[in-house]
Amino acid sequence: MKLSKTTWWMIGGAGTAFLSIGTFLYFNKKVTQAQKSSVGFSSKPIVLDTTQGANTRQVPNWSACFDMNYTKEVQQWLTPKSILILDIQTAKEYAKIIKNAKGTFNDNEGAVRVIFSKRIRDKTQVSEMSKAFWRLYKIDMWQYLKSFLSQRELAENVTQFIRQIPNYTLA
């Protein structure tokens, strides 16, 4: 069976269209993933507060609450006021619950959700829990959460609650 010129043009056009759409979807997915990963908690440079003249203080990076130094930066910024800090024992208990939430076949997202939705009251407590997690397991807690929770699960069980809590609580 011999194909006519018109048939060859139709096959070529359909193939080109298929390849074009596939290429677009592939690169669009990569760009979307890159944008989602840059929206998370990052350690951006600290901004200077110049409203106090000679007594310039560094403003903490409010979106970096998983940083172990976040609480110290907040305390320095608020000096001479003091803030409430999560005690070490409670932070270790929460860290153990987070560590045990990762399962071989089935992860316990509910345990992670309870910690971040009901137990944690401010971002300094997240920092203290992250510090306790590092001391116990020598693993960054944010990276550990990302290792077993998908982007959607992180948003539902962690980040949505962290965005709603205050940065600190004064004592």
Image: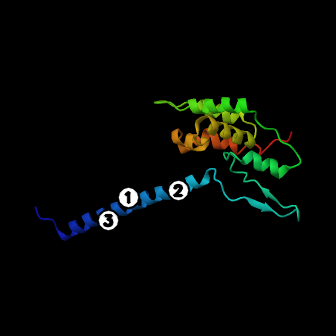
Q: Residues within 10 Å of mark 2 (few under 14, many from 20)?
A: few
Residue at 11%, 64% (x, y): give it.
Answer: 2
- The amino acid type, in three-letter code, at marker 3 is Thr
* Residue that label 2 marks: 34
Q: Which image quarter holds the C terminus?
A: top right
- The amino acid type, in three-letter code, at marker 2 is Ala
Mark 1: which secondary structure?
A: helix
Most foreground residue, 21 or 124: 124
Query: In x, y percent, where is residue 152?
Result: 55, 43
Badge 2 or badge 3: first in the primary sequence: 3
Q: Residues within 10 Å of mark 3 (few under 14, many from 20)?
A: few
Mark 3: which secondary structure?
A: helix
Badge 1 or badge 2: first in the primary sequence: 1
Mark 2: which secondary structure?
A: helix
The residue lying furthest to the bottom in this view is 5
Asked if residue 171 lies left or right of residue 86, the reply is right
Disc 1 from disc 2: Cα separation: 19 Å
- Residue 22 tag number: 1
Residue at 42%, 61% (x, y): give it.
Answer: 24
